[in-house]
Image: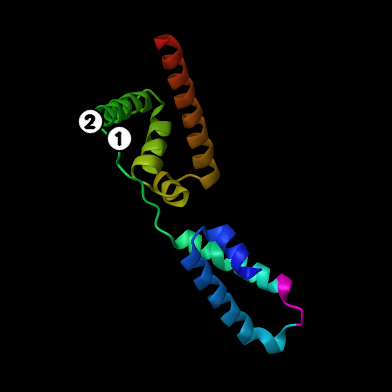
Amino acid sequence: MLLKAAKGYLHNDADSEDAVQTVLVRLWTMVDNVRKPMDGLAAVVLRHHCMDVIRQQVRTTTLDGHDQAEEEESEDYAAQLTRLISQLPPLQQTIVRLRHIDNQSFAQIAALLDMKEATVRKNLSRARLALKDMILKKQAYNE
C-alpha cells in the first residue's frame, strides 16, 4: 500500500522505495507509543515525507528551442516595462523598484521609507494595477 502511494507521489521507483523505507523506520521508532492499526498514520507520514522529497528536488528546465530572438524579445519587454514604471508616481516607482528589482521585503521597504507595511503593500498594489492597465492599453493599441 505504501509503495503504491509513494509511486503516485514521486513517479520514480527508486525514490518511492527510499521513501517507504524511511517511513517504515520512522514508524518502527514510534511503535511503542502508537495505537494499532497504523495504516492511517503510515499514509500521513508517507505523504508528508514525499512532499518533503518533492520540495527538495531541484527543478531544471532545458534550453531546447531557445534562440536569440526570444532573448531579444525579453530584453525589449524589460525595457518597455522599465519605461512604464518610470511613468508611475514617484512613491510607487520607488516601491516597485525596491520590491521587484532590489528584492527587498515589505518590512525593509517600510523602514526605508518610514511608513507602515500596510501602506507599502497598498501602494505596491496600486502600482501593479496601474502597470497592468498601461500594458493592456498598449496591447489594445497595437492590435
Q: Nearer the viewer, residue 117 or 74?
A: 74
Q: Is residue 9 above or below residue 111?
A: below
User: Could you tell me which secondary element the residue under label 1 belongs to?
Assistant: loop
Determine whether, in the image, residue 95 is placed left or right of residue 123: left
Residue at horizontal 61 percent and vertical 64 percent from the top:
4
Q: Is residue 16 magenta?
A: no
Residue 28, located in which quarter of the rendered image? Answer: bottom right
Query: Separation of disc 1 and disc 2 at Cα?
Result: 10 Å
Determine whether, in the image, residue 78 is placed left or right of residue 105: left
Residue 74, located in which quarter of the rendered image? Answer: top left
Amino acid beneath label 1 = Gly
Determine whether, in the image, residue 81 is placed left or right of residue 24: left
Amino acid beneath label 2 = Gln
Q: Nearer the viewer, residue 95 or 81?
A: 81
User: Could you tell me which secondary element the residue under label 2 belongs to?
Assistant: helix
Q: Is residue 78 above or below residue 18?
A: above
Q: Residue furthest bottom?
A: 32
Q: Which residues are magenta?
A: 35-40
Q: Residues within 10 Å of mark 2 (few under 14, many from 20)?
A: few
Residue 5, located in which quarter of the rendered image? Answer: bottom right
User: The N terminus appears in which quarter of the rendering?
Assistant: bottom right
Residue 27 placement (x, y as % from top left): 63, 81
- Check disc 2 and report the residue beneath it: 68
Residue 84 placement (x, y as % from top left): 37, 24
Nearest-to-viewer mark from 1 and 2: 1
- Check disc 1 and report the residue beneath it: 65
Q: Nearer the viewer, residue 125 or 2?
A: 2
Q: Residue furthest right?
A: 36
Residue 67 placement (x, y as % from top left): 25, 32
User: The C terminus appears in which quarter of the rendering?
Assistant: top left
Magenta span: chief secondary structure: loop
Residue at horizontal 61 percent and vertical 86 percent from the top:
29
